[in-house]
DNA sequence: CTATATCATAGAATAAAATTCATTTTTATT
DNA sequence: AATAAAAATGAATTTTATTCTATGATATAG
């Protein structure tokens, strides 16, 4: 017995996801043309995908350099309590400059992605914000020199 | 002498970015209301932001679990040529399952973010795709157990 | 201080798209 | 095959996007 995930997406839904993850502002009319459907039918599906939390939002992708966020860093850290470290994680998540917080397997406990203006502002962030997060034992900061690829598009399966 | 970045965004532009990075499908009418402007004026600004590559795209955020991508991993790797490693990076970037490729400072050379169905498909990816990428000396894979936060919204400055 | 160039906005008109809804068709289930 | 549920159609209506011209603001040079 194969347990499918309970989202039950057909190939039309997957096609919608594929199109919208590349262009969130595509019109219903164009979506309908691409899918050989009528706009109202597409609209209904999109609404349903939103309600089912398959589509969880629509984001404009902003060039970080244009808003003066030139530094990207990954910070891996160890925590005192290795399992009940959820409060540590949620404290980290509250920091606006923190884009990602992952609990990871291995030596460390968290992997955090951070974007700041420059190394000085990263330093300030570490000093002012991270220092207040409880139960952190060690911190290892990795500076990104160059980003070659950065996309949030997923590989949507065929069926 | 302060060198501003050459994007010259005023506070209205920044407000547009703030609104659109949270809701890429907001209508011009609603944007205009929020900004106390007329729709045509807002439209012109948005178009300009696109042309100047301040806004680089609009993405629907798809729930990875809904499309059966339940495994997230970060892979850090060393490369043979530490500086002219661009061909290695661009080969990595060509792999669709790879969401991010960063050149990093420190012991390693690259940090790669990958999403797959499960550990078996990650293994297959490493075996079939990564093995073909030239000049890789070592690979260290970190499995994500839980993602506490993952957003691409940036902290847009006030002015 | 004024002329001029540049840029942004307002507001109206038009075109396009979104949305709603009653009906029909398709699909799945018994 | 009969029934129920889900999805699609197509027309009507509402809303939004887009275009265009006139106006106003701002900056710069003379």
Image (spheres, coloured by chain):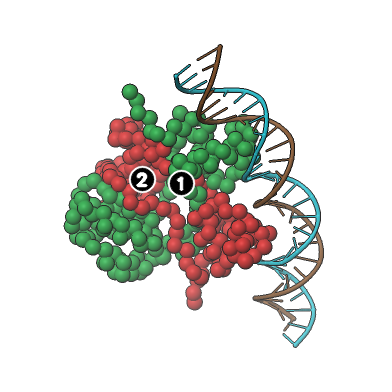
Chain colours: A green, B red, C cyan, D brown
Instruction: Kindly tell me whether residue B117 is visible in this rendering.
Output: yes
Q: Report the front residue among B94 and B11.
A: B11
Q: Report whether A105 appears left or right of A8.
A: left
Which circle, 2 or 1, is nearer the viewer?
1
User: Gap between marks 2 and 1, in whole Å?
Assistant: 20 Å
Query: For the point 44% across and 59% down, which residue is it?
Result: B154
| Residue at the disc numbered 2 | B113
Q: Which mark is residue A103?
A: none
Q: Nearer the viewer, residue B140 or C10?
A: C10
- Residue C4 horizontal side relative to residue B128, left or right: right
Can you say whether B72 is above or below B159 in the image? above
Local secondary structure at mark 1 = strand
Q: Give the labeled residue for mark 1.
A: A56
**Subunit of mark 1?**
A
Q: Is residue B137 left or right of residue A67?
A: left
Element under label 2? strand
User: Can residue B56 be seen by looking at this rendering?
Assistant: no
Chain containing mark 2: B
Callouts 2 and 1 on one subunit: no
Q: Residues within 10 Å of mark 2 (few under 14, many from 20)?
A: many
């Amino acid at each position: 017995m194969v347990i499918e995930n309970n989202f039950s997406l057909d190939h039309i839904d997957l096609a919608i996801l594929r199109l919208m993850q590349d262009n969130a502002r595509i019109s219903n009319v164009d979506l309908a043309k691409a899918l050989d459907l009528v706009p109202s039918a597409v609209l209904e599906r999109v609404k349903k995908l939103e309600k089912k939390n398959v589509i969880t939002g629509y984001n404009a992708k902003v060039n970080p350099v244009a808003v003066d966020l030139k530094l990207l860093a990954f910070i891996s850290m160890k925590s005192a309590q290795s399992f009940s470290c959820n409060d540590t994680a949620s404290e980290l998540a509250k920091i606006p400059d923190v884009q990602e917080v992952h609990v990871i397997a291995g030596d460390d406990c968290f992997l955090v992605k951070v974007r700041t203006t420059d190394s000085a502002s990263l330093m300030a962030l570490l000093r002012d914000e991270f220092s207040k997060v409880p139960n952190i034992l060690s911190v290892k900061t990795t500076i990104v020199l160059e980003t070659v690829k950065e996309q949030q598009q997923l590989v949507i399966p065929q069926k």
